[in-house]
Amino acid sequence: MRRTLQLSLKFLATIVLLGILGLGGWLTFSPPDGLLSASAYAAKMVCSNVFIAKRDADMVIGTDVEFAIPRIVKRMKINVDTANQRVEVAYLGLFAKRYAQYEEGRGCTLVSKDEVPDRAAAPPSPPAKSDALWPAGESVQLSEDKPLLTALNDLVLHGPGMRAIVVVYDGHIVGETYGEGFSASTPLLGWSMTKSVNAALAGMAIKDGKLSLDRKNLFPQWAGGARAEISVADLMAMTSGLEWDEDGNSPDPGRLENLAKDAAAFARDRELVAPPGTKFNYSGGSSVLLARLGRTRLKQKRELIRRSDCSSLWA
């Protein structure tokens, strides 16, 4: 009886050990996309907030990262290498490792273990600060309106996690208040507000004759297919017809932002599920394609200027 019990315990221990080894091998050699995306998100978030916004790493982990991935953040080991301005994240300290590297003037980029981001051109110099009123400069004239001041000082109205409230009226800042650890000079992540900025930049390029709303055949990979009918206007209006799901539970945004080596290629190669221009679908992929299109055209313009000194290159 005792021998039978010992054999049973040994058998169970062997099964448990094999299960642990199998799970470890799976997480080592083929970790799930969700885990890789979570590690990448944590690395990028901590890197940007520590080296750009100059925030405390533990505060960032306990708020920004905890909010986005609450179920696994406590199982992650997050190492901030201040000397090399680099962040390493690994699940249980071993699995799904991802890295983010800070570069002066460029920000933080997801990289492989030993990768140094390849930047052919130097980053543009920031414009000199002006004493003019915002938005032309950094100065503000704050309003003395009592209801406005009451709202700006109402902590209950602000709610938990408030970081910045800026009130703009008639084109100027008339009121502002900031959460603990934040100020007017603290860079904040733009998130999807960047989509509006991206569309505005495209609109400026269209106004200057550098792009046209009805331009089609936007990428060589679309030649000869139905996607060739997607226009600049379709990308700006998010009516491209390309398959995309921006829902919080969808893997599309996470794959685009955290896993794809080339985010624009990831969005570009999606299947067409509706005729272009017929159906609105909120899509980060469309915004990325619009940004890539503008960047490509700008690089072409610079190359032609370098070769021929020609200034009318967008016709």
Image (spheres, helix red, strand yellow):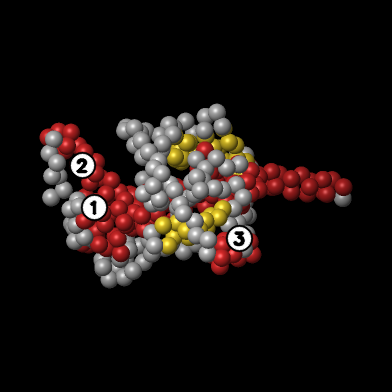
Q: Is residue 292 left or right of residue 63?
A: left
* Left or right relative to 155: residue 251: left
Where residue 84 sits in the image (x, y, percent)? 52, 29
Q: Is residue 32 visible?
A: no
Give the mark toward the camera: 2 or 1: 1
Q: What amino acid is labelled 1 in the image?
A: Ala
The mark nearer the N terminus, 2 or 1, is 1
Residue type at mark 3? Answer: Asn
**In what element is the residue under mark 3?**
loop
* Disc with the residue nearer the chain's start (3 vs 1): 3
**Residue denoted by label 3:** 153
Residue tagged 2: 300
Residue matched to label 1: 205
Please state the horizontal and vertical placement of residue 289, each as a whole percent of the image. 31, 53
Q: Residue at x 79, y 47 (%)?
A: 9
**How far apart are the two marked residues, 3 and 2, measured between alpha carbons?**
50 Å
Residue 187 in view of the camera: yes
